[in-house]
Amino acid sequence: MDAQHTLGWFRARCGHITGSNVGLLMKSGRTETFSETGKSYLYQVAAERAMNPVIIADDELFAEYIRQTEVTSKAIRWGNEQEAEARDLFARITGRHIVEVGSCKHPTIPYFASSPDGFCYDESSGIRSCLEIKCPNQATFMRYRNEICDNESLLRVKYEYYYQCMAHMMCTGASETFFIGYNPFQADPIHIVRIIPDEKVFAEMERRVCLANELIDKMIN
């Protein structure tokens, strides 16, 4: 399994509906199943599935494609740089052994994958756990600390992160995801919230991803 943000990881995700974007498919339009933002995402995924395989297979060409299409910013780069510190601090606080993982494909839903920011397995209990780490600015971190404490509040405050956590559990079989807010400038720099599975949400996500796949097939065939 290729590490995140490597060419192999981008290849594994190419043409897939991913955990970081599946939330875009969970809102309906006024008269249609998917919102305009959701439909735009479907076109993006369809375009990836219809890509020239020569470009995907060639490291140099595919790297150029990634450079041209990857969304980045100063805040995103800073957040990525802080992720390892957040993961290490979580491990020290909880005593868990955390491993990094790449793109985890759902065992039965085609073209559906998610990439947790960490994974751990407790042999004594058999519990599998995922991590989803966010490293926002101080004001946003304080909002997370004060407003996010469980499934319902995460859905209300940042619905896309809620569905990302759900996707992690769907794709890995984990029984919990720890949503982690981290800002190293704070005296207490980490906020940890345990998110648990919701089978009704899983079923609706599966329905929408499968419908999205049907629509994408029609676009490219």
Image (spheres, rainbow, N blue to C red):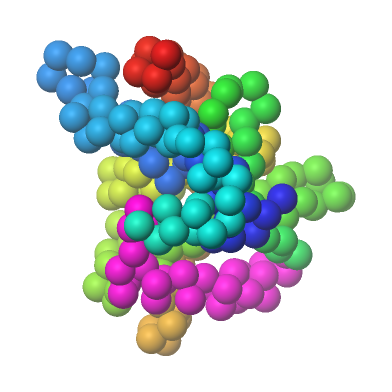
Point out the residue furthest to the front here.
54
Query: Residue 75 at what x, y percent from top left?
Result: 32, 72
Relative side of 137 to 85, left or right: left
Q: Name the foreground residue: 116 vs 197.
A: 116
- Measured as percent of width and height from the top left, residue 183 is found at 40, 77
Q: Left or right? Give the position of 168 relative to 35.
A: right
Q: Please identify the residue farthest to the right as the structure is shown.
A: 124
Magenta residues span: 69-96
Question: Where is residue 60 shown, x and y percent of the image?
Answer: 54, 59
Along the viewing direction, whichever of 30 and 55 lies nearer the viewer: 55
Residue 154 position within the rendered picture, expressed as x and y whole percent measured from the top left: 36, 47
* Total numbered badges shown on the rendered structure: 0
Name above or below for residue 104 compared with residue 26. Answer: below
Assign the magenta stretch its main secondary structure. helix
Name which residue lies at 31% across and 74% down.
74
Tell me which residue sits at (39%, 72%) in the image.
77
92 inside magenta stretch = yes
For the question of whether residue 14 can be seen, the reply is: yes
Q: Quadrant of the C terminus?
A: top left
Quick check: 169 above or below 73? Answer: above
Whether residue 167 is visible to the viewer of this picture, yes or no, is no
Choose top left, top right, bottom left or bottom right for residue 48: top left
Q: Residue at x 67, y 70 (%)?
A: 91
Q: Nearer the viewer, residue 46 or 100?
A: 46
Task: Give the residue displayed 77% in from the left and 51% down from the top.
Answer: 121
**Placement of 111 over or under 139, stated as above or below:** above
Q: Nearer the viewer, residue 149 or 58?
A: 58
- Residue 17 as seen in the image, left or right of residue 31: right
The answer to whether residue 56 is magenta is no
